[in-house]
């Protein structure tokens, strides 16, 4: 059963599709209106990262850094040291891909209030190909002390995550996507930092049950898979893990206690990301069989997002098959 | 800018020598760390903390203080020693350098010790942070009288990020930004001219729209004048290329790149045996100034 706060068109082809980056753009403008200390920095990708509306509304609080992501991270560190709340935006492949050490040392170890927006994350970047498809960023950021890591489900959640990040005092990483993806949540859906949300609750009384733990814009694929699996007589819950760090271990343990197995789903390498985090957490708290869906130690390639999700086994069919197999 | 009397210069030179003595003592005690850069920069740090900076050691977080960003974090013994002599923390604490539990980390960590404006060690990121600070200040206060000093090594100019930051500083015309480069001509692997030639360095910064001065980094009056001129520059950032002598103050260590990353007691042996290095270093310092009365370190 879908959580009642989700969009009424969830599970249907009529669901609205928007890029999650749009939600970041809206959230940034709103954060800028709420707090005059919020500033934005961009490395020559202002339109596609959706920093542009903020830059137009607050030109004196926007800095065009040029194509220099390492500089951008450390400039933001300096601004935060003076009391600003800087958001730095680029493609995830370049920030945190290229400027990881600057983020580690000058942002996270310095423990300053910088928000890192990794746009065009995941395989669904599409035609730009492997050079632009960040599949390692969750791992890169999750490893750094003091860093919070968020992968919103959709544009609405990206807006909320941006506002929450602006209010949180400390480094935050938010990964957002390029392509149009289903808007599954609503303004009424809860979004609490560090708390996972059940998007689908299993039917009681099934012989076998599986929990799908998903992060980011694949949430709707997980929900469609849940509907199919339930029709096959398998009990399914879908937990959306918007915050990957700190991980909601309590939610995971209660999920593991109530299901026979877990499938994790993410647009990321199968090591180091959500699947890695879930496996690490449950291995010491509630060991359970886990299948990790993601890109399996490969680079991506050009193609349309749907083609790529199917090829790398992140579409509805692949999730259904993995879930069936693990409880077979 | 303050005019320095002869008495002021003597006072500052004497303070710099006390700071050099602390640097040698703390490095010997730590048994690791960098010698050449800290000794070479002692005069400039002394001038900054005892004459130039608007700061308050008893209130390190005073909002209106100038900011000093140390980009080449490995020369932190000179920063620590100067902060201690300026009153930020007890001088005795210098002997905890690099030890477990110490606030004096091997490379500086902002949250560990009062007076540190940033964390540094990985090279090339300090100028970016100083630029960010200056930009933030200008957003809030376009007529600010605060200055943002970035101290960098010449070797770290190999890092591309320095030039990314320089490009932005020039673009943004950050006239309250003053970069001071420790031009001692050495880096770990050798002389800068061999590892990665930097010249023509002044012209490089001029082409990035910086006001450029080249100064003898051990001439306290000349450095003070140069900083005063840099403060008066309008519409562009400033850089002072301070020509210094690596390991200045201990002539048997001077100008030798092999002293970049070794403490006295672990340096090259061809001029002074390891067992004699600490003693010789302190004796040379006393000979230099003729005014230091502390007894030998144990």
Image (tube, rainbow, N blue to C red):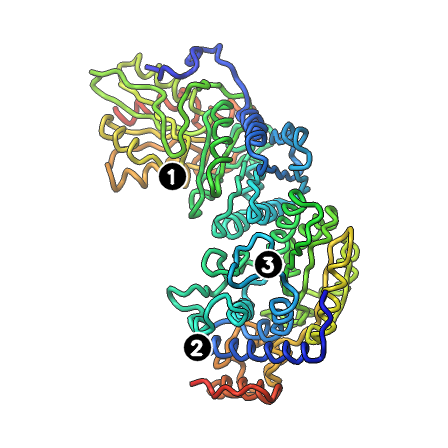
Task: Please state, as top left, top right, bottom left or bottom right, where the C terminus of chain A lies in the image.
Answer: top left
User: Is B250 situated above or below A234?
Assistant: below
Horizontally, residue B19 falls left or right of residue B134, namely: left
Give percent across and percent down for residue B245.
Answer: 66, 76
Task: Please identify the quarter of the rendering in which residue A196 is found.
Answer: top left
Whether callout 3 and callout 1 share a subunit is answered: no
User: Is A141 situated above or below B219?
Assistant: above
Q: Which is more N-terminal, label 2 or label 3?
A: 2
User: Is A51 situated above or below B281?
Assistant: above
Q: Residues within 10 Å of mark 3 (few under 14, many from 20)?
A: many
| Chain for disc number 2 | B
Whether callout 3 and callout 2 share a subunit is answered: yes
Q: Which residue is mark 3?
A: B69
Horizontally, residue A161 falls left or right of residue A320, namely: right
| Chain for disc number 3 | B
Residue A178 can be seen in this image: no
Q: Which residue is mark 2?
A: B29
Give percent across and percent down for residue A38.
Answer: 57, 37
Residue B117 can be seen in this image: yes
Give percent across and percent down for residue A208.
Answer: 23, 21
Residue A246 is labelled as 1
Dot 3: element: strand
User: Mark 1 and mark 2: span between their CA atoms?
Assistant: 40 Å
Whether callout 1 and callout 2 share a subunit is answered: no
Residue at 51%, 35% in the rendered image: A166
Q: Residues within 10 Å of mark 2 (few under 14, many from 20)?
A: many
User: Mark 3 and mark 1: span between their CA atoms?
Assistant: 32 Å
Give percent across and percent down for residue A44.
Answer: 67, 37
User: Mark 3 and mark 2: span between their CA atoms?
Assistant: 26 Å
Residue B139 is labelled as none
Dot 2: element: helix
Disc 3 + disc 2, Cβ < 8 Å: no
């Amino acid at each position: 059963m879908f959580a009642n706060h989700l969009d009424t068109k969830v599970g249907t082809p009529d669901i609205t599709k928007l890029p999650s980056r749009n939600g970041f753009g809206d959230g940034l403008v709103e954060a800028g209106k709420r707090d005059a200390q919020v500033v934005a920095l961009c490395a020559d990708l202002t339109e596609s990262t959706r920093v542009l509306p903020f830059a137009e509304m607050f030109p004196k609080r926007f800095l065009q850094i040029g194509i220099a992501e390492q500089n951008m991270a450390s400039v933001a560190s300096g601004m935060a040291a003076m009391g600003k709340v800087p958001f730095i935006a680029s493609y995830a492949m370049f920030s945190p891909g290229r400027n990881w050490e600057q983020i580690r040392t000058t942002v996270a170890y310095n423990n300053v209030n910088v928000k890192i927006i990794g746009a065009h994350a995941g395989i669904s970047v599409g035609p730009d190909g492997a050079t632009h498809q960040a599949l390692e960023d969750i791992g890169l950021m999750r490893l750094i002390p003091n860093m919070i890591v968020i992968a919103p489900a959709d544009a609405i959640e990206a807006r909320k995550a941006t506002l929450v990040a602006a209010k949180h005092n400390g480094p935050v990483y938010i990964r957002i996507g390029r392509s149009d993806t289903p808007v599954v949540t609503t303004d009424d859906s809860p979004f609490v930092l560090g708390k996972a949300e059940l998007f689908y609750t299993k039917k009681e009384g099934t012989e076998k049950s599986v929990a799908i733990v998903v992060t980011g814009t694949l949430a709707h694929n997980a929900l469609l898979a849940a509907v199919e699996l339930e029709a096959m007589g398998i009990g399914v819950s879908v937990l959306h893990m918007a915050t990957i760090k700190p991980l909601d271990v309590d939610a995971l343990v209660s999920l593991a206690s109530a299901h026979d197995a877990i499938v994790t789903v993410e647009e990321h390498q199968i090591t180091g990301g959500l699947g890695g985090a879930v496996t690490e957490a449950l291995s010491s708290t509630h060991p359970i069989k886990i299948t990790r869906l993601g890109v399996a130690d490969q680079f991506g390639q050009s193609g349309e997002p749907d083609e790529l999700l199917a090829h790398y086994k992140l579409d509805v069919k692949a999730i259904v098959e993995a879930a069936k197999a693990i409880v077979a | 800018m303050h005019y320095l009397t002869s008495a002021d210069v003597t006072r500052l030179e004497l303070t710099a020598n006390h700071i050099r003595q602390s640097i040698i003592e703390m490095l010997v005690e730590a048994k690791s760390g960098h010698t050449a850069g800290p000794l070479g920069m002692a005069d400039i740090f002394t001038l900054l903390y005892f004459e130039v900076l608007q700061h308050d050691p008893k209130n390190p977080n005073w909002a209106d203080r100038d900011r000093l960003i140390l980009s080449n974090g490995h020369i932190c013994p000179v920063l620590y020693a100067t902060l201690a002599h300026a009153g930020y923390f007890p001088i005795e604490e210098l002997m905890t350098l690099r030890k477990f539990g110490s606030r004096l980390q091997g490379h500086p960590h902002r949250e560990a010790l009062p007076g540190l404006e940033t964390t540094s060690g990985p090279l090339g990121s300090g100028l970016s942070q100083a630029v960010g600070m200056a930009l933030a200040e200008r957003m809030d206060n376009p007529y600010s009288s605060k200055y943002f000093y970035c101290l960098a090594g010449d070797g770290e100019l190999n890092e591309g990020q320095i030039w990314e930051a320089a490009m932005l500083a020039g673009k943004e015309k950050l006239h309250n930004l003053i970069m001071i480069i420790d031009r001692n001509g050495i880096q770990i692997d050798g002389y800068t001219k061999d590892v990665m030639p930097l010249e023509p360095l002044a012209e490089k910064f001029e082409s990035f729209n910086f006001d450029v001065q080249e100064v003898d980094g051990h001439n306290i009056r000349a450095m003070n004048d140069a900083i005063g001129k840099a403060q008066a520059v309008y519409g562009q950032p400033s850089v002072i290329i301070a020509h210094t002598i690596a390991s200045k103050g201990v002539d048997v260590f001077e100008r030798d790149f092999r002293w970049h990353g070794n403490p006295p007691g672990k340096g090259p042996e061809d001029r002074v045996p390891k067992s004699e290095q600490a003693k010789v270093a302190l004796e040379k310092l006393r000979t230099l100034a003729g005014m230091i009365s502390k007894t030998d370190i144990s």
